[in-house]
Amino acid sequence: MLVDIENLRIAFESNGKRFEAVRGVSFKLEARQKLGIVGESGSGKSITARALMRLLPPQAQVTADRMRFDGIDIQSQSEREMRKLRGGRAGFILQDPKYSLNPVKTIGNQIAEAWRTHNKGGKKEAREAALDLLEQVMIRDPKRVLDAYPHEISGGMGQRAMIAMMLAPNPTLLIADEPTSALDASVEAEILRLIDELVDTRNMGLLLISHDLPLVSHFCDKVSVMYMGQVMEELAAGELAQAKHPYTQGLLNCLPSLDHPRTDLPVLTRDPSWLEEKAQ
Amino acid sequence: MLADFRAWALDDLATSRRQAAWGRRYRIWLALKANPLAMIGMIIIGLCVILALLAPLLAPHDPAIQDLENRLARPTAEHLLGTDELGRDILSRLLYGGRITLGIVVAVVIMVAPVGLAVGTIAGYFGGWVDKTLMRITDVFLAFPRLILALAFVAALSPGVESAILAIALTAWPPYARIARAETLTVRNSEFIEAVAMTGASSWRIILRHVAPLCVPSLVVRVTLDMASIIITAASLGFLGMGAQPPSPEWGAMIATAKRFILDQWWVALSPCMAILLVSLAFNFLGDGLRDVLDPKQD
Amino acid sequence: MNQRAKSFAATLGSVLVTLFGLSVITFMIGRVMPVDPVLAAVGDNAPADVVAAARAAMGLDDPLVVQYWSYISNVLQGDLGQSVLTRNPVVSDIAHYFPATLEMATLALILATLLGVPAGIVAAVKRGSLTDQIIRVVCIAGHSVPVFVLALLGLLIFYVGLDLVPGPGRQGFIYDGMVPTVTGILLIDSLLAGDMGAFWDAAHHLALPVLILAYFSMAYITRMTRAFMLDALKGEFIISARAKGLSGWKVVMGHAFPNVAVQLITVLALTYAGLLEGAVITETVFAWPGLGQYLTTALMNGDMNPVVGTTLVIGAIYVGLNLLADILYRVFDPRVK
């Protein structure tokens, strides 16, 4: 079992008001399995992933009945032990390379730094490893990119560099938080295919977070649909058509389709009863 | 009454512009109240203003009466803070000095705010070469170290309180012009200005009646932030002998005179030093708190 | 590349306009001076025709534009007029007094940076904590007190009270004039002369004024460092740095700080300019024979040429430092390229 989360709750407090962003989320991910978490913005999918890496700001109040990564209890780990997990055992790809790469450090340095944090080796070896990684993510002209600053390369290349950076320590789990939503649609498929291939060849598990249900189901083994901090439904990717929950059906129904053009897209109607907490 | 106001001001669904404005002000006040340093600053400023205004009633002695027999005396029951080199009561002089400092601040603000407002709104409203010229001039003044320029101005005008006020005002207006310009630019193309223009109102009328009033709140904030530096500049001019002249109990001038006795009669210099320290600290605490409340992400 | 050259040309242009404005303002200040330069030259009791002749000879009857032209051409040739008090050309006076100010202000800037930048970083990392509050109050206090009050209090405490530092002045009298002037900066000159006694004496005298000036200017550095760091720490790249498994310290110093460093260059340049202003006042308290002392002495005596000259020079340094900050920003920030 790679990831095992049971009844995760995350709350924020501001000006005396408490806001529960995640309310009892549970899911499991086996080794070499691919799980997609789908939901609208604000559904709590991103902070669920960040909670797993303990990357949330200290104000966030995180509780869970169980939160394990590869058998390790995340909640009881010290910060030092967490640092070994972060990057080393689990890579985390963020949404927009324009913001998630450090603007004043070269791509090569940022990748080499990730490598050196988890591997023993000198600067020269790290640089070679970085070049090798850039080749693995099939970037054009890796030698030039190595010494380029993030603003000097395109968004797609930036995201490839980000992936290279997170693969550097050879993790067993890759978390990708909306890895393509800041990119052009033409690049989107390439990046996802790249992630998919790398996950397969490296025998990694994948946690793919997205708002795009059909896309996720295309790349993942199973899909978890989140709404307002709760999991509405979890189902195998192939069984999307048999989705039972009205929210999932609604999401699928909202998509424009080339095969069956419609003049109006239906508006998703939301039922407050979805949010009544399910008996544990 | 108060509860009504509270509910009315904090109503998230304000029905009028006025209600929304008061709501904003009330929230600023609430945030400010939660900042202990800002409140301390505000209380000290309030006390100082009262003390300065009531100086004729509170001062135990006439600040100008000399007593050469009893010069540079240590603090006693008769002279709580001692006497200066001419035997004058330091406490009384401090109280009266507060009036001068307060007067300088008020005079500078009265001169500076309208000038800054005029330059900024005119530059922002008309744009083009008017804007470019006015802002270039503003930048030139901003490019000077403020105190040095004020010193040179005073030297050219002959030292004195009036010249000091004029010099500080001459160096203080550029930031106000910048703020007023920025505010003007945000409303310049809004629909209600266009609507007023279509009724046939002249540009000057629009600036005076519709644009300028909108700039006032930001200017008020800036004034509060600026007061400490006005006080410091005024005191520095006094200290360098370019502001209020000797018989006057201005704090900076008092320190300049007392500086000579600092090795033996240190208390003579200490009390005006502490007075300036307290007042400018208070203004900075308040200004800092205000800045936090109004613009938390800014410095 | 072209874009870059263009924006740099715009900066240079605005610098030139500012310098022009500077010269106009100083010119005007010189024109409305309270002391009549003619009477100062020919004496108060000179007959009317002598006064008129002197007036014409000094070019004071010419239109203002012509007068300005002769003023600016003199300035450009390095002629700022003569001081009535010292009877020296103002330019050579400034050259004589400036090193003392430069020495004090530079050391103060270094000290303020060494204290202020780390304080700002700590305050940002520990935002809202007691440490943050203490740093904030200490800094506000340093910045909101007029620097002459700080200086006097410093003298009272460290000289009168504790006797830790020597009194006012730049040198003990036994060392006065013992070290040959090479750079005018005593610490360097005494080392060049190999006179360690003079070196330690100069350092001893520098300690308090430098400390006071550093404290005075630390507030701005700390506040800006804190603000920039808070901004940088909010960045997504901080999350990715942490996601790589870097330690908190490496994230702060290796990722947040490099983003801030370039912006700090501007802050330091502005601080340096502000230090010159603080130095003018500090010098009067410490009887420091620098530019500030020269300026204030001239002010008290209505000696206008030094006043105008010093104001012009300090203004030009101010503008120069701003330009320098701009250039450094372009050179060091990869994002500008």
Image (cartoon, rainbow, N blue to C red):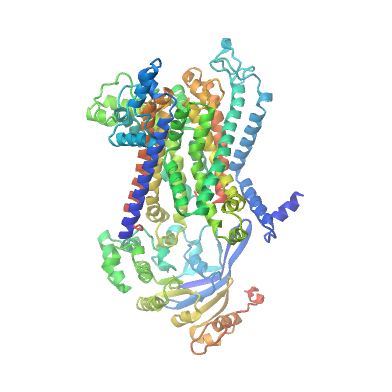
**Is residue A220 shown above or below B46?**
below
Residue at screen point 52% across, 89% down: A260
Q: Is residue A166 visible?
A: yes
The residue at the far right in this view is B1
- Residue C226 in picture, x, y percent from top left: 46, 48
Q: Quadrant of residue B156?
A: top left
| Nearer-the-camera pick, C58 or B96 | C58
**Is residue A21 shown above or below C120?**
below
State the quadrant of the N terminus of chain C: bottom left
The residue at the far bottom in this view is A259
| Nearer-the-camera pick, A245 or C309 | C309
- Residue C78 in picture, x, y percent from top left: 28, 34
Q: Quadrant of residue A7?
A: bottom right
**Is residue B192 shown above or below C141?**
below
In the shown orientation, is residue B149 left or right of residue A8? Answer: left
- Residue C38 in picture, x, y percent from top left: 38, 23
In the shown orientation, is residue B216 left or right of residue C243? Answer: right
